[in-house]
Amino acid sequence: MGSIMVAHLQVPAIDSTPNLPTTPFPLAIRKLMLEEMGFEGLVITDGLDMEGVKKYHRSGEVEAKALVAGNDILLIPPDVPAAVSRIKEYLAEGKLDPSHLEASVKKVLHAKYKLGLEHFTPVDPENLEADLNHPKGLAIKRKLIQHSLTLLRNERHLLPLDRIDTLEIASP
C-alpha cells in the first residue's frame, strides 16, 4: 500500500484523553502503525481544516504535532504561515526530530518520482478536455475497466448486504 490517510478519530482503546484525535498522536501513528505494523508508505493527515482537529488545537500546533506523530503529508492546513512558524519552533525546541522531517520529505519525493511526477507540467485550462481524454489515459482507463470487478446481483451473497434498506452510499 502506497499511502494511508489518518482520520481525525478518537480511539479510546489507544488513549482516552478527551479531544485527542489520532492525527497528532505519536502512539497511534509512529508507534503502532510505523514501528509495530511496519507500514512504510506515506502517512497523510485528513483535512486539517476539519472541526475534529481545529476545534481543539490552535493553528499551527496540530500541524507540528502531526509531523511529530509520524505524518508525512499535512492535508489542507487552515493557516500555512502559522503551521510553518510552529514547525520551525518545534525543530528549534527539539520537539520535532529533523531526521523524521527529512525522512518524510524523502518519502514524498520518492513517491512523486515513482509516479513520474518529478517534472512538473502545468495544466493549460484551454486544453483541459483534450488533456484529460488523451489516448494514453483512455488506454489506461480501458485496461482498468477490463480488470475491475462489478457485482450486478448479489445472488450468492458475495457481499454481506443482508439488509439493503440500511445500505448507504456516499458520493460527491
Image (cartoon, helix red, strand yellow):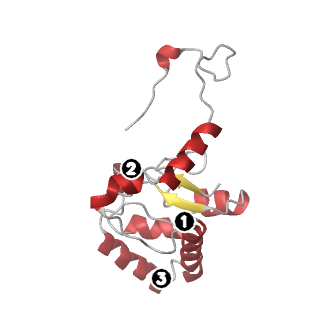
Of the residues under marks 1 and 3, which one precedes in the sequence?
A: 1
Instruction: Give the residue number, with chain letter if any, for mark 1.
Output: 69
- Whole-percent x, y for residue 33 in the image: 65, 57
Of the residues under marks 3 and 2, which one precedes in the sequence?
A: 2
- Whole-percent x, y for residue 37 in the image: 71, 56
Question: In the rendering, which numbered label is found on residue 91?
Answer: 3
Crowd class of label 1 (few under 14; some 14 to 19; many from 20; radius 10 Å): many
Whether residue 20 is visible to the viewer of this picture, yes or no, is yes
For the C terminus, the image quarter is: top left
Crowd class of label 3 (few under 14; some 14 to 19; many from 20; radius 10 Å): some
> Amino acid type of disc 2?
Gly
- Whole-percent x, y for residue 150 in the image: 59, 29
Would you say 153 lies left or right of 89 here?
right
Query: Which residue in the rendered view is the most extreme toward the left?
Result: 126
Please report the residue visible at 63 percent of the width from the left and 22 percent of the height from the top: 160
Query: Which residue in the rendered view is the most extreme toward the front?
Result: 135
Please report the residue visible at 69 percent of the width from the left and 15 percent of the height from the top: 156
Q: Quadrant of residue 46?
A: bottom left
Instruction: Give the residue number, with chain letter if any, for mark 2.
Output: 52
> Amino acid type of disc 3?
Leu
Crowd class of label 2 (few under 14; some 14 to 19; many from 20; radius 10 Å): some
Please report the residue visible at 65 percent of the width from the left and 54 percent of the height from the top: 1
